[in-house]
Image (tube, grey):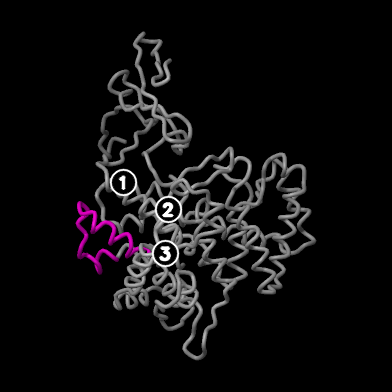
Amino acid sequence: MSDHHVIIKDQSSGQSLELPVIRGTEGEPTLDIKSLPASLGYFTYDPGFSSTASCTSDITFIDGGQGILRYRGYPIEQLAEKSDFSEVAYLLLYGELPSVSELAAYNDEITNHTMVHEQLNTFISGFHYDAHPMAMMAGVVGSLAAFYHDKMDMDSSEHRFLSAKRMIAKMPTIAAACFRHHMGWPTAYPKNSLNFAERFLHMMFSVPTENYEIDPVAAKALDLLFILHADHEQNASTSTVRLVGSTGANPYACIAAGISALWGPAHGGANESVINMLNDIGDMSQVGKFVARAKDRDDPFRLMGFGHRVYKNFDPRASIIRVAAHEVLQALGTSDPQMDLALELERIALEDDYFIEKKLYPNVDFYSGIIYKALGIPMSMFTVMFAIARTVGWVSQWVEQSETPTRIGRPRQVYNGPSERDYVPIKSR
């Protein structure tokens, strides 16, 4: 084995193959196995693709062991403290932090696309009043290609970036419209004098009968959540967007597929699961019992919102959002038994030897659910909030993939079904 190749040998045939080693700017070295099937006749088996790099990317870097998350090289801690969501969105999409004039031009473009075609509101009104907002989101976003089919030449960089900015701008408008339909409220149109988070809060909660005052604490917390959720490397929904994009599908179809993947309770629905868990616990007197159940290997109960598949020591986003969660609860004066339960679980997780040893720390889903609930956002909208933020990551990944020649995604399988057999006529079976 050299610094740049790994030699593997098939003991049954005696054949050997030299596999190149791909080294990124950071992260683990990766074996290039493209030649393996043609040379030795083998494929690799990796359920869930947890050990497979499906692409190269310049956008997001994660080191789960060290608790590192960086967007385009910038630590998430610095962006959360010093930046805002619009600047982060520009960074993810274009690769560099904007100048004052570049950010102003970007914000002008986004505000120019916040409106949606009026017939989309008619489309939304066709959903049953109690339809889940994520079901509406997937349907409405998938339909955008029928409303915005101009400038959809995916071989044009100008058209790709226009589609990306349309999605970033319109996603909050669509999300708020789905919420208001669910509530039976009239549509609220975007106010482009407001920033991204403020505009969304206004579309969500303003009513025609009175003035709506935007709480700066709420807007700041929401902007922070959008930053923390903007991108997260090749997760399930982002990989879905890339896989669909590899077929040449239009961007709206790709993002609709990402929304559908995000809806899963193991992915974007995790913060809903936190609130459901708090409902199951019920009150403070039951906390000890449920903690004991979480420690019991034979009990199927699991504490939701604790630990993370990628981050093995701590989730850097959780460290940031924990402070924001406490600030929101204090500033809004929220009094809620569920919040008391959540804070008690947090205390136990940070002090109990079992949780410390197992590294079952509260993750970003734990705290985001608390903040959303404190802001008055219903649980059915939690994953929609995730989708608004992650749209920036999705379109950035989609643009990156579209800018380079890409083969259509085609995973292989290990077949375990019957071997060849003859058809038997139905009367003879």
Q: What is the span of residues highlighted in magenta in the rendered image?
A: 144-168
Find residue 329 and report its horizontal and vertical position in percent. Answer: 67, 68
Does residue 162 belong to the magenta stretch? yes
- Identified by mark 1, the residue type is Gln
Find residue 154 and report its horizontal and vertical position in percent. Answer: 22, 54
Query: In the drawing, what numbered circle is on residue 261?
Result: 2
Between discs 3 and 2, the one toward the N terminus: 3
In the displayed structure, 342 sits above or below 189; it is above
- Identified by mark 3, the residue type is Ala
Q: Which of label 1 and label 2 is nearer to you?
A: 1
Horizontally, residue 94 falls left or right of residue 47, namely left
Horizontally, residue 82 falls left or right of residue 249, namely right
Q: Residue at x 72, y 62 (%)?
A: 341
Instruction: Judge the density around disc 2: few (<14), some (14-19), many (≥20) Cα neighbours within 10 Å.
Output: many
Whole-angstrom CA distance, mark 1 to mark 2, is 19 Å
**For mark 1, what is the residue?**
401
For the image shown, how many numbered marks are present on the structure? Answer: 3
Q: Secondary structure at mark 2?
A: helix
Residue closer to the observer: 295 or 317: 317
- Identified by mark 2, the residue type is Ala
Find residue 136 and report its horizontal and vertical position in percent. Answer: 40, 67
Instruction: Judge the density around disc 1: few (<14), some (14-19), many (≥20) Cα neighbours within 10 Å.
Output: some
Query: What's the magenta bit mostly, secondary-structure-wise?
Result: helix
Q: Secondary structure at mark 1?
A: helix
Q: Secondary structure at mark 3?
A: helix
Query: In the drawing, what numbered circle is on residue 135?
Result: 3
Between discs 1 and 2, the one toward the N terminus: 2
Residue closer to the observer: 259 or 63: 63
Does residue 361 belong to the magenta stretch? no
